Amino acid sequence: MNFLKFVAQMPAIGIRSVASLMSQTKLPQHSTQSLVNRISGLLFQGRTMASLQQMHRTGPHYKKRIKKRPLDGNPFMKGVVIRTLIKKPKKPNSANRKCVLVKLSNGKEMVAYVPGIGHSLQEHHIVLCRVGRLKDCPGVKITCVRGKYDLGHVIKAKQ
């Protein structure tokens, strides 16, 4: 096999096939092994630290922050209740937070918090959700709006 053809095929093949191709060449064994090591070093060369000159040229490195947009930038979104849940808050707090699993109109399924005391939500009820996370419950990023669709206002307790 011609050595130039071998080098031309290098980007398309993996390291395992490099050894099999090297065995077909007419080079001595010790030189083929060193060549395989050199080529594998080139293919798997990691990213090295930038020099001070490169860092000065390119400026400071800022990480790109991913925007958290649970409702894809919309202020409100309609959803259908799949199931009612009771979530336990994180460590210093202790209570039962009333939540619902909602299938939103954009196709996402998310856990939404139901604020206020008491609700009558069941499966297939329609709710309006807004962005507003529940800080002490992980994964709860939206809140249901009281008084819209099937979720009624909070009823005051009579004394």
Image (cartoon, grey):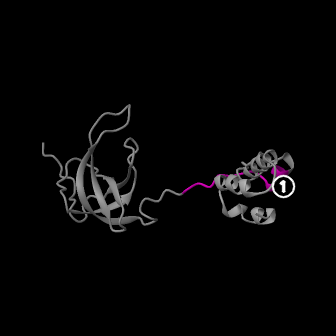
Residue 116 vs residue 4, the one in the foreground: 4
Give the residue displayed 30% in from the left and 62% down from the top: 103
User: Which quarter of the figure has residue 12?
Assistant: bottom right
Give the residue displayed 18% in from the left and 52% down from the top: 155
The percent coordinates of residue 138 (x first, y second) are 39, 44
User: Which residue has dot 1 on it?
Assistant: 57
Q: Please say whether residue 55 is one of the residues in the magenta stretch.
A: yes
Which part of the image, by quadrant, shows the N terminus?
bottom right
Extent of the magenta region: 54-66
Q: Residue flagged by tag 1: what amino acid is it?
A: Arg
The percent coordinates of residue 61 (x first, y second) are 72, 51
- Taking the image as shown, residue 66 lies to the left or right of residue 36, namely left
The percent coordinates of residue 143 (x first, y second) are 34, 55
- Taking the image as shown, residue 136 lies to the left or right of residue 39, namely left
The percent coordinates of residue 68 (x first, y second) are 49, 56
Give the residue displayed 18% in from the left and 49% down from the top: 156
User: Which quarter of the figure has residue 10?
Assistant: bottom right
- Count of numbered badges drawn on the protein: 1
Q: Is residue 15 above or below residue 103?
A: above
